[in-house]
Image (cartoon, rainbow, N blue to C red):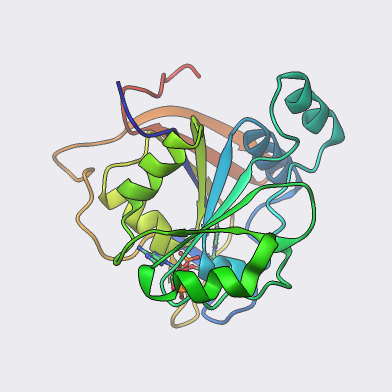
Amino acid sequence: MADRPYTLLSCSMSFVFNNAAATESRLLLSNDLDFDRVDQVRAGVDAIVVGATTVRNDNPRLLVRDPGRRRARLDRGLTEHPVKVTVTQRGRLDPSQRFFADDGSRKLVYASSRVAAALDERLGRLGEVVDAGDPVRMADLSRDLYRRGVRRLMVEGGAAVHTQFLADDLVDELQLVVAPFFVGEAGARRFVGEGHFPWHPGRRAVLAETRQLGDVVLLRYALSDRCAPTD
Ligand SMILES: NC(=O)c1ccc[n+]([C@@H]2O[C@H](COP(=O)([O-])OP(=O)(O)OC[C@H]3O[C@@H](n4cnc5c(N)ncnc54)[C@H](OP(=O)(O)O)[C@@H]3O)[C@@H](O)[C@H]2O)c1
């Protein structure tokens, strides 16, 4: 029996696997159909993780947008929105970011021991700061979320967070969306950084689904036997 949540990792990227611009400006890769699909996926999870850089650069809301999906969550005895989760080493999080908005969602900030107390003081009641050790390990974060009742977890990025979850073999399902263009600028970030990944030429991931959504395509891969190819 796993002691971590069922974890799905979601990323949209260009033809050359860039998932972000070289600058801090947001690179829009998805289309409306895919944004709606992502909203549906969010509505089906207990928590969403993003790295602190994504909180700073993209300023995402990380909420379920569709009112019907929010009502359905409440009918199932869940909160209207999943728990928002972020992780920080340096503690540079601005309380005015949308992540910390007074929107009814619970916020968890996994911070390295070096900055946890100061961040807790700065955020006050806006979010719960978890002293997550030093360094913060995604396996510990996953187990802690499981202890807090999170059974389905969505990892939305960016690359630093994706890389650690994948390299540490903590992902059950990979959802990749390919946008139909190239990003050729120097320094544009990639889906993952360097790492030793459990999937390589000798161990190929299992393709579970392909789905066309307008001009983008979703590729769903099963990375563990917890992900049924017919989900
Ligand atoms: N295309 C997509 O699907 C998608 C999705 C999400 C994000 N993005 C893009 O990705 C970009 C950001 O990616 P990124 O790789 O630069 O950053 P990221 O993964 O969003 O965040 C990295 C930051 O998270 C914290 N962090 C990560 N691992 C940690 C650990 N083990 N312990 C403690 N803190 C840790 C650190 O925060 P501190 O610096 O605070 O210490 C680190 O600098 C954004 O510009 C965004 O647009 C794309």
| On screen, residue 74 above or below 99 | above
Name the quadrant containing residue 190.
bottom left
Q: Is residue 2 left or right of residue 27?
A: left
| On screen, residue 81 above or below 23 | above
In depth, the one of 119 and 187 nearer the eye is 119
Q: Position of residue 168 (x, y in %)?
A: 26, 48
- Is residue 27 in sight in this rendering? no
Q: Is residue 225 left or right of residue 119?
A: left
Q: Position of residue 207 (x, y in %)?
A: 38, 30
In depth, the one of 177 and 125 nearer the eye is 125
The quarter of the picture where the N terminus appears is top left
Name the quadrant containing residue 208.
top left
| Residue name at image x 56 percent, y 66 percent | 54
| On screen, residue 3 above or below 85 | above
Q: Position of residue 222 (x, y in %)?
A: 37, 30
| Residue name at image x 79 percent, y 52 percent | 103
Q: Residue furthest left?
A: 202
- Is residue 115 in sight in this rendering? yes
Q: Is residue 29 left or right of residue 182?
A: right
In depth, the one of 150 and 120 nearer the eye is 120
Q: Residue furthest right?
A: 67
In depth, the one of 180 and 221 nearer the eye is 221
| Residue name at image x 76 percent, y 36 percent | 80
Q: Is residue 83 left or right of residue 103?
A: left
Q: Position of residue 151 (x, y in %)?
A: 49, 29
| Residue name at image x 71 percent, y 34 percent | 79
Number of marks:
0
